[in-house]
């Protein structure tokens, strides 16, 4: 068990068929100004040369370890990697994204200054098929009940991952990070966004980040309404609706006519 004053960071990188990109991602972590860190990679059943690229880097850098699993999705891969982590703090990073050299440094400084902080993230930019600043809504629990504004690559304590049950493995490929933040933060915890551009979010033509069809969106809404009913009813006065930002207004109207209890 980590000591209370241990500020080791475990950078968690799930990857799938990212042989052409994974080295750039890992190099961005190796360029970090912060120590101590470890890098834990979980290959999620890649069928390309991802493992050969990773194994070559493992031989060069003792702080990197790698595990393999059958293709099971990013939540299973993240949970697998975090279960192996020895760090007090976790930073998930997808196998095609990048971080700035000072991101971890600034985040840990925030945790040291205020132990009540639960999550630290930063400003972000998109690159690749789309470029420019990623305009994120300000964090609040009220906003979190309608949408996600914390990207997956935020820092938090491993103990909080354990307390909320990890990433939902039964919600494969559908905004699992949003559900994770709800589970971790719905009962309180300070969230800080650093005023630095520390995260670079790759958009590629074959990325799963191209959007969500109606069926997946409805599945996600049903999942949140079922698993986090207390949270959505507290902030939306009823269940989350398909038009999420209209949920509170619609629920209040239904209550007014006695159609929702």
Image: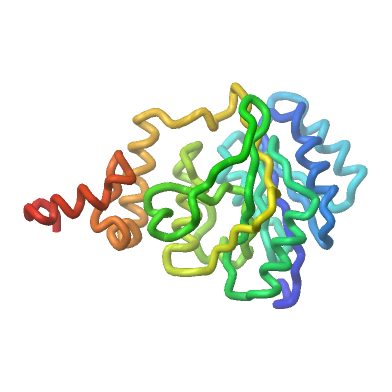
Where is residue 122? Give x, y as percent.
64, 53
| Nearer to us in this view, 51 or 258 | 258
Tell me the quarter of the picture where residue 68 sits: top right
In the picture, which quadrant includes the C terminus? bottom left
Left or right: 138 as drawn, with respect to 59: left
View extreme (top): residue: 205
Q: Is residue 25 above or below residue 161?
A: above
Q: Residue at x 57, y 47 (%)?
A: 151
Where is residue 213? Give x, y as percent.
40, 28
In the picture, which quadrant includes the N terminus? bottom right
| Nearer to us in this view, 9 or 248 | 248
Q: Residue at x 65, y 58 (%)?
A: 194
Please say whether residue 90 is visible from this viewpoint: yes
Q: Residue at x 91, y 43 (%)?
A: 59
Where is residue 103? Give x, y as percent.
73, 54
Left or right: 15 as drawn, with respect to 243: right
Q: Residue at x 83, y 42 (%)?
A: 27
Where is residue 228? Give x, y as percent.
36, 56
Q: Is residue 133 above or below residue 207?
A: below
Please say whether residue 69 is visible from this viewpoint: no
């Amino acid at each position: 068990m980590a000591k209370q004053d241990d500020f080791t960071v475990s950078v968690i990188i799930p990857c799938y068929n990212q042989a052409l990109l994974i080295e750039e991602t890992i190099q961005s972590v190796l360029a970090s100004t912060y120590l101590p860190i470890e890098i834990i990679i979980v290959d999620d059943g890649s069928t390309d040369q991802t493992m050969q690229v990773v194994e070559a880097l493992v031989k060069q850098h003792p702080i990197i370890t790698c595990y393999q699993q059958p293709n099971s999705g990013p939540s299973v891969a993240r949970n697998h990697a975090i279960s192996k982590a020895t760090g007090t703090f976790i930073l998930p990073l997808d196998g095609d994204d990048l971080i700035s050299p000072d991101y971890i440094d600034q985040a840990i400084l925030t945790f040291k200054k205020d132990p009540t902080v639960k999550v630290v993230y930063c400003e972000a930019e998109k690159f690749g098929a789309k470029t420019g600043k990623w305009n994120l809504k300000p964090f609040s629990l009220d906003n979190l009940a309608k949408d996600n504004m914390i990207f997956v690559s935020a820092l938090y304590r491993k103990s909080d991952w354990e307390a909320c049950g990890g990433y939902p493995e039964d919600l494969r490929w559908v905004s699992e990070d949003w559900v994770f933040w709800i589970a971790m933060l719905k009962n309180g915890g300070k969230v800080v966004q650093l005023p630095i551009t520390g995260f670079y979010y790759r958009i590629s033509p074959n990325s799963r980040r191209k959007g969500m069809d109606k069926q997946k969106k409805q599945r996600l809404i049903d999942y949140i309404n079922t698993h986090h009913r207390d949270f959505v009813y507290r902030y939306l006065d009823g269940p989350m609706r398909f038009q999420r930002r209209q949920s509170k207004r619609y629920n209040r109207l239904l209550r007014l006519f006695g159609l929702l209890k």
